[in-house]
Image (tube, helix red, strand yellow):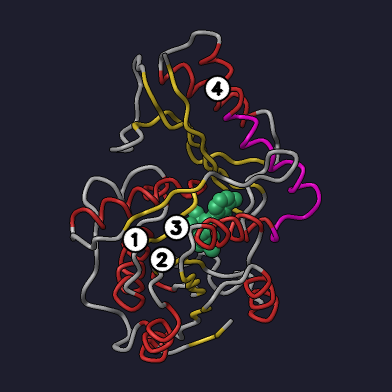
Amino acid sequence: MQIVQHPIQLRLNIERLRGDRKVSLVPTMGFFHEGHLQLFRAAREQGDLVVVSSYLNPTQFGLGEDLARYPRDLNRDAAMAEEERVDILFTPTDDVMYPSGTPRTWVRLENLEEKMCGRYRPGHFRGVATVVAKLFNMVRPDRAHFGEKDFQQVRVVEQMVKDLAFGIEVVRLPTVRENDGLAMSSRNSYLDSDERAAATILHKALLEGKCAAQRGERSGNEIKEVMEATLAREPLCRPQYAGVYDVETLDEIMGDRHGHVLLAVAAYVGHTRLFDNLVLALN
Ligand code: AMP
């Protein structure tokens, strides 16, 4: 595996190594866990040249968020990526990604970025869309792989690819969970043992919402209330939102709905902000 920091070196290496293979990009912020590894494997299994980017993107963090304490360990990540037979690990610096400091050009997604998590993290999805657009321009992949754990992020990227005609196939992969249901996340490393136990409440809330739907409940608002009541049972949990959403527009659904819907929750457990979701077919 090659580790490269500069986009010119990156392009040279991609062209030298690719042969007649397609190029897959997996964008990450590092500190790999099994959720990341499954994305690498999916790209590998398609027979592609696999480029993983690891960049802790400052423009997607708000003031007072966890940029400074976000976990990092490049040596550990490089060993894990190598083990998964990643071809190139791209680790650009801030100077390379933002040569003029704060950019003047931003990618914004009207009517998508301000919903769900975006309501509580203003500017977050603008930072995500902008950095992913830059990575797409640097790597020029045929495919890019994203986890449904960050459902709003994958919707933002899909929409951006369509609206700006990037011509890249966006591949979605299901959420990878711990045995007790907690969605894997680099941020889970912030949790102490009591918080770690309490954090399972997010997935429980989604499952209770799903159970309500399986009992015949079709009203978004009723399912939302079931999820809110579940979150309220856990004293270490401070909920931000729970709701049922349209899988395309991410609009909240309050009334009755049939077909696929997104159940999503976000909450602080201690000082750690966690979020989770699942897609449900209401028939
Ligand atoms: P991150 O490093 O957290 O920005 O995540 C990089 C990529 O891994 C994103 O596409 C995430 O959606 C994906 N990812 C993170 N956690 C999981 C998980 N538990 N299951 C599946 N994909 C994940």
Tell which circle, 3 or 2, labels the residue nearer the N-terminal end.
Answer: 2
Tell which circle, 1 or 2, labels the residue nearer the N-terminal end.
Answer: 2
Q: Tell me residue 65's x, y (percent).
A: 51, 64
3D distance between C-alphas at marks 1 and 4: 31 Å
Q: Nearer the viewer, mark 4 or mark 2?
A: 4
**Amino acid at the residue labelled 4:** Lys
**Amino acid at the residue labelled 2:** Gln
Q: Tell me residue 32's x, y (percent).
A: 63, 65
* Badge 3 vs badge 1, beta-carbon distance below 8 Å: no
Q: Secondary structure at mark 4?
A: helix
Label 1: how many residues lie within 10 Å, few (<14), some (14-19) or many (20+)? some
Main structural element of the magenta stretch: helix, strand or loop? helix
Q: Secondary structure at mark 3?
A: strand
Identify the mark at residue 60; answer none if there is no mark.
2
Outermost residue to the front: 20
Residue 62 is left or right of residue 160, and the answer is: right
3D distance between C-alphas at marks 4 and 2: 31 Å
Q: Which residue is mark 3?
A: 145
Query: Which of the image's four quarters has the N terminus?
Result: bottom right
Q: Nearer the viewer, mark 4 or mark 3?
A: 3
Tell which circle, 4 or 2, labels the residue nearer the N-terminal end.
Answer: 2
3D distance between C-alphas at marks 4 and 3: 27 Å
Identify the mark at residue 123; answer none if there is no mark.
1
* Badge 1 vs badge 4, beta-carbon distance below 8 Å: no
* Badge 1 vs badge 2, beta-carbon distance below 8 Å: yes
Q: Nearer the viewer, mark 1 or mark 4?
A: 4
Tell which circle, 1 or 4, labels the residue nearer the N-terminal end.
Answer: 1
**Amino acid at the residue labelled 1:** Gly
3D distance between C-alphas at marks 3 and 2: 19 Å
64 is within the stretch colored magenta: no
